[in-house]
Image (cartoon, rainbow, N blue to C red):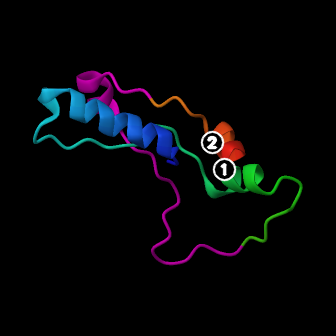
Amino acid sequence: DFINVADVVAMIDCCIKQKKSDGQIYNVGTGLTTNLHQLWQHLAPGIKPRKAPARVGDIPRSQASINKAKKELNFKPTVALAKGLRQF
């Protein structure tokens, strides 16, 4: 789960402005899974990645559950991965 820094700032802003967030813990993310191959396609289109066998400790998939932040803070990330990478 890759999130744009603008969305992280928006989440922090939600927490600061809403008293009910005091003392709470929220996941910050997009709620979408992006694997390394998809990320590579955005960063180096047209260049074939060199693949290697998985290593002990590799995380094959990561996706943040942002349900609590959506429900309690009305948080919704707005910057898509492709757009954020273009801005970078």
User: What's the CA distance linking mark 1 and mark 2?
Assistant: 6 Å
Circle 1: residue type: Phe
The residue drawn where x is 68% and y is 40% is 82
Q: Secondary structure at mark 2?
A: helix
Determine the secondary structure under disc 1. loop
20 in relation to 9, above or below = above
Instruction: Tell me if residue 4 is in the magenta stretch.
Output: no
Range drawn in magenta: 52-76
- Determine whether label 1 and label 2 are within 8 Å by CB: yes
Q: Position of residue 79 (x, y in %)?
A: 56, 33
Asked if 82 appears above or below 61 in the picture, the reply is above
- Residue holding disc 2: 84
Name the spot of residue 63 as percent of width and height, x first. 45, 46
Q: Residue furthest left?
A: 23
Q: Which mark is residue 88?
A: 1
Q: Amino acid at mark 2?
A: Gly
Left or right of residue 59: residue 82: right
Left/right placement of residue 13 relative to residue 51 reads left
Quarter residue 49 falls in: bottom right
From the image, give the main secondary structure of the stretch colored magenta.
Answer: loop
Looking at this view, is 55 or 40 the one in front? 40
